[in-house]
Image (cartoon, rainbow, N blue to C red):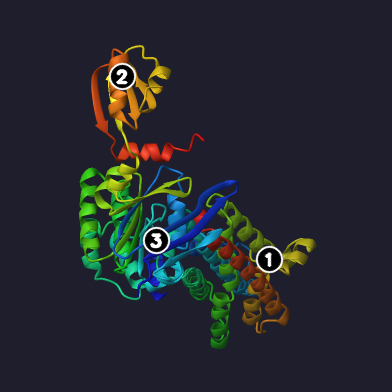
Amino acid sequence: MRAYVRLELRRLARMPGLLIFAVLMPLLSYLLFTNLHGLTGQDRDVAATYTMVSMAGYGAIGALLNYASGVVVDRSIGWMRQLRLTPLSPVRVVVGKGLAAMVTAIVPVVALCVAGVLVNDVRLGPVQWLAIVPLLWFGALPFALLGLGMGYLATAQTVQPLNLLVYLGMSVVGGLWLPLDALPGWVAAVGRWLPTHAYADMSWQVAFGGSPTVTDLLTLAGWMVAFTGLAVVGFRRSVRSTASL
Amino acid sequence: MTNAAVQLTGLTKRFGALTAVDGLDLTIRRGEVVALLGPNGAGKSTTIDMLLGLQRPDAGTVLLDGQSPAKAIAKGTVGALLQSGGLLPDLTAGETVRLTAALQQRSRPVRDVLDRAGVTEFANQRVGGLSGGQQQRIRFAMALVADPELLVLDEPTTGMDVETRRGFWTTMRQETAQGRTVLFATHYLDEADAYADRIVLLRAGQVIADGTAAQIKAAVTGRTIRATLPGADLVGLAALPGVDRVETRGDVVMLHCDDSDTALRSLLSSTDAHDVEVTARNLEDAFIALTAAGSSK
């Protein structure tokens, strides 16, 4: 499986578009949001930290959804079928794809944290950094599974719009663009229970001196179970009928 | 170890109302080179998919050297080249084959295999920019890299030009000289005739003939009489003794006969037929006769 993951990473290096999209968009948004006119003093410091976490998460989720749902391409061109002729089992293919996807997620997280420190003078303690980076990285795992699920269930034509809808929808409603407090009440009520919110809130809590809440952990775990189910269903369906790959 | 290289028993696959493979039995001994021949829709690809474990049969079993296809593939004792198997356009030809080698428990030296399959000259080029024939050679290299005992090839020379096709079969000959078992599907009769020890003819998911090329030709006995006969009375011709079936092409009539001597006597005495030729049927005739028979019933 190591050979397969290496290969996936090599492919990734050859399509830099995906990472540019996943890093550049949130990075520019971050620098824009936090340097708006009239944002000064403590407000600005809070915004710089808060938005650093939001946009790091936004980038990580984007990278994962985009990369993992790319499995639809491997299916439609018959690459999955070709792999079935090798000893690499379908389960290892999907795990390998997931692992490679997780590698992509670290890039926007690191980029945003570095920008936070260098450009916006974000100051956190070493323990906070040691918590936030892994939380933003590994906490995004459910989105890798969601991406895989979509990649196995959607078709090459439907996957892009579906991806964008889910990505933007969950990011906006989950409070990654604007804090939930700034959203209409009923939107915030829904957003509170989205995986995007639970995921980012773990790091917001740490960044402002707290620790992840039980609600965050349970919410994210619940979604993790649901997304795993989705990925397993899609994966099983695709393996059963390799003919239609 | 006396297991057959391939043992298909009662293999059946349905797609809705269509029965693609219909209770197919086939045993292939070690070292045999077998062509699976049949028109489009005869069930060749579906049979191969089930043989490789890519599709689950609705009924019947597949044993490759006494094992399930999944086990055989995991052990690397089966190599396959599928038309429908896709390659990643962003990898180079060499990387693609090296990956396949790295996934195997044991593999031949990649350089060697690239050479044999004729991939070396474009090994550093991205797959996306290569022709269909070149991609087919990459698939061939992938099939060979584990040094498999059984090679399964689905229409292997599709997309290759004449020169490349010849080169491909020369390599195949060398590969089978080492005692490898080969099963290849094709719709090129000349390939089946030239390269297979044994031809299995499929129609509507069933084996309708199985033997050497000579045996299959013989199974369709008889000869064809060709003559020029303007305004021929087709019904009358078909009623001549020894005549099986009549066709016309313009002024030329073709009498497919089971007893051409008797038919010829009557033809010459009862009509003005001239420019008469009598020919034995070739494999193509046998193929058409066998695959068409029964489709009208």
Q: What is the chain letter for disc 3?
A: B
Specify whether residue B174 is in view: yes
* Relative depth, front residue between A182 and B65: B65
Q: For the N terminus of chain A, which image quadrant? A: bottom left
Residue A10, how many percent across, how many down? Answer: 37, 67
* Image position of A92 (left or right of B222): right
Tag 1 residue: A174
Give the CA distance from mark 3 to mark 1: 61 Å
Q: Are marks 3 and 2 on the same chain?
A: yes
Residue at 39%, 45% in the rendered image: B38
Residue at 54%, 83% in the rendered image: A129
Contact check, label 3 and label 1, Cβ < 8 Å: no
- SS class, disc 1: loop
Q: Quadrant of residue A38?
A: bottom right
Residue at 36%, 71% in the rendered image: B76
Identify residue type, mark 3.
Thr
Question: How many C-alpha atoms fall within 10 Å of the one at disc 1: few (<14), some, or many (≥20)?
Answer: many
Give the CA distance from mark 2 to mark 1: 89 Å
Tag 2 residue: B267
Tag 3 residue: B27
Q: Quadrant of residue B248?
A: top left
Mark number displayed over residue B81:
none
- SS class, disc 2: helix
